[in-house]
Image (cartoon, grey):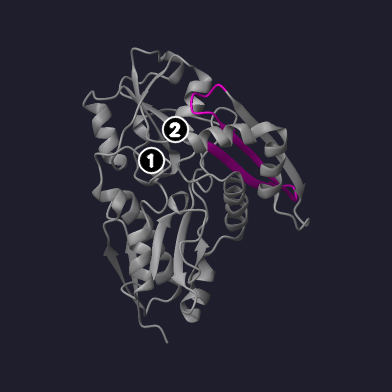
Amino acid sequence: MIKSVKIGTRSSKLALYQSNLVKEKLSSLLPSIKISIVEIKTKGDKIQDRNLDRSIDKGFFVKEIQEHLLDDKIDIAVHSLKDLPVENYSGDLTSIILERGNHCDVFLSRNKKKLSDFDHTLKIGTSSLRRKAQLLNINSDLNIDDIRGNVDTRISKMLNGEFDGLVMAAAGIERLGLQKHVTEYFNTDQMLPAPGQGAISVEVKKTNNELFEMLKNICDQETDLCTYYERSFMNELGGGCNSPIGAYSFISNNKKKITGSILSLDGKQVYKRSLEKDLSDDINIGKLLAEDLIKSGAKEIIKKLTIE
């Protein structure tokens, strides 16, 4: 009989919000269980003077938390799903996915300007290669620079004049109640989100059957399935969580649908397609779509990304 649960998380405001959300959901199911939150510093939190690139993104924000889980220092680990490498860090771990928040990206600006008002004289901050490539595809004249830090840190940098605009995940902005800084929401035709964006992953050791059975009660099956397709798409293309790859999957009218893209870093080359199948069709539409893009020529972009 489980008497207590330790939740491991990063210490940012967003990470703590997400962990407290998990805590509330578990407490509502089993109010007698004592639930505590353990804050853990990851490599991504410690290294703030280095820009993210594809060579360092694997487990950059999750590895230390997973190590705590494997060493039984915590019982579950809470992550933003898009931070988890598509390759399992350990076969000893499994996870459930909460109901997804807003999957979109948003544009924030210091003077309430929209992206269409921006040119090379105004600086946009983002550390995401996916966002950079899609922004340059929209307007090659844009001035885009790297920015590091948590959600509130990035917004502070913008308000202080270091940046004129930012592109960030809508879910994080909404969870922290910072919508007043948003000037527009991007739809998926303008900017595809990162695979798994807006979803929260809760990891547990596979050997902890009792706790895993408990966590199943807060798992959202539709989010779990759709993000699985998105991450399969990225994995099949050979990308990591900071590659210029976007994907979004959803279910509607008994159809499962996915749109995926891969871009060159300058945004000039884009391979983007959509696919839908009957929900009852036992096929991984993410993997299928990636194979389709590779056949259509996306392999050339993948080769260049590997070399660069």
State left or right for residue 118 relative to residue 210.
Answer: left
Image spot of residue 173 (x, y percent)? 38, 40
Image spot of residue 187 (x, y percent)? 55, 31
Q: Amino acid at mark 1?
A: Ile
State left or right for residue 203 relative to residue 148.
Answer: right
Secondary element under disc 2, as helix, strand or loop, is: strand
Secondary element under disc 1, as helix, strand or loop, is: helix
Residue drawn at the location 45% of the way across and 54% of the way down: 84
Q: State yes or no: discs 1 and 2 in contact (Cβ < 8 Å).
A: yes
Q: Main secondary structure of the magenta part?
A: strand
Between 285 and 270, the residue placed more toward the observer is 270
Q: Amino acid at mark 2?
A: Val
Residue position for label 2: 106
Residue position for label 1: 173
Between 292 and 277, the residue placed more toward the observer is 292
Q: CA distance from mark 1 to mark 2?
A: 9 Å
Q: Is residue 165 magenta?
A: no
- Which label number is shown at residue 253? none
The part of the chain drawn in magenta is 244-268
Could you tell me which quadrant the N terminus lies in?
A: bottom left
Label 1, residues with CA under 10 Å away: few <14, some 14-19, many ≥20: many
Q: Is residue 255 magenta?
A: yes
State left or right for residue 69 relative to residue 200.
Answer: left
Q: Where on the picture, by quarter, is residue 164?
A: top left
Q: Which of marks 2 and 1 precedes in the sequence? A: 2
Please say if 26 is above or below 256: below
